[in-house]
Amino acid sequence: MSAHSARVAVVTGANKGIGREIVRQLAERGHTVYLGARDEQRGRAAAADLSADDLDVRFLHLDVTDETSAKTAAERLAQEAGTVHVLVNNAGVGGPMQPPSQTPADQVRSVYETNVFGVITVTNALLPLLRKASGARIVNVSSAIGSLKSAAENLDQTGEHPPGEFPSTLLSYASSKTALNAVTLAYANELRGTGILVNAASPGFVATDINGHHGRLTTEEGARIPVLLATLPDDGPTAVFLGENGTAEGQVLDW
Ligand SMILES: NC(=O)c1ccc[n+]([C@@H]2O[C@H](COP(=O)([O-])OP(=O)(O)OC[C@H]3O[C@@H](n4cnc5c(N)ncnc54)[C@H](OP(=O)(O)O)[C@@H]3O)[C@@H](O)[C@H]2O)c1
């Protein structure tokens, strides 16, 4: 194991979109960042591109749905870095827009593989390295659409959708983020007292491939809340769901 002086961060699903920008912003703050991607070519290209700006960004092959891939990535990190200070579980997939009554369970299961089970797989693989770091942070990139309170009230607390129009046609995606929120709280509670802070971020409605670039925010704006949670001070919160609302501190969302 080699000693590493900079804080080490791992971002999953980071070859494009919000994840790639989280990598840039963490590297600009002095982190050594492992850019996780399931596709080697896309991942290497993104890492090379960011490294060209004099940032310490390294490609990490990581398919979050594959236990072996997560284990291999953890072994490499253990050898190269020894510890991991920041894990941003960003990789995510969307689901078809259709009423729940017309959504086959297999479609839901497939979205959960990445958005929920993938987060558990990667977190468990990297936890031994996160426990070795001083003041580690885990950030799960969720969505305001995953809020149970908003769903129950049929009201979007972020104001991104007009009142009464909380999306009801996203069963697989929305419920996967609800499950991810529950997963976030479970880890936060297990890790209370260890110095590892575990929180969920809602990046806002960001123009990326996942929504056909219909989002209103840029990826720079969308990366802000995940980066804020990834760089919390030691007395920062755990078990918080924080969303983008344009203010410096963000908006604490109801779970
Ligand atoms: N955009 C928004 O408005 C918005 C709002 C709320 C939450 N989010 C969340 O933000 C996160 C990033 O989304 P985005 O908007 O940046 O979308 P995106 O541009 O489509 O990026 C998604 C990333 O996840 C990767 N990915 C998918 N499955 C993977 C797997 N099995 N293993 C590793 N990587 C995988 C993709 O890799 P490939 O290129 O190989 O497919 C891609 O790099 C997601 O969790 C999303 O749910 C986005």
Image: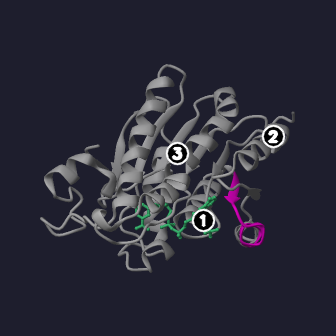
Q: From the image, state whether disc 2 or disc 1 is nearer to you.
A: 2
The answer to whether 155 appears left or right of 217 in the picture is left
Q: Which amino acid, mark 3?
A: Ala
Q: From the image, state whether disc 3 or disc 2 is nearer to you.
A: 2
Name the residue at 53% across, 25% down. Answer: 195
Gap in angstroms between the C-alphas marked 1 and 3: 14 Å
Residue occupied by mark 2: 75
- The crowd level at tag 1 (other Cα within 10 Å; few <14, some 14-19, many 20+) is many
Q: Nearer the viewer, residue 83 or 99?
A: 99
Q: Nearer the viewer, residue 9 or 205?
A: 205
Q: Which amino acid, mark 2?
A: Glu
How far from the left and from the top, in percent, is residue 200?
42, 45
- The crowd level at tag 3 (other Cα within 10 Å; few <14, some 14-19, many 20+) is many
The answer to whether 8 appears left or right of 183 in the picture is right
Please report the bounds of the magenta region as a residue range: 33-45
Q: Which amino acid, mark 1?
A: Arg
Mark 2 vs 1, N-terminal side: 1
- For residue 49, which quarter of the picture? bottom right
Gap in angstroms between the C-alphas marked 2 and 1: 23 Å
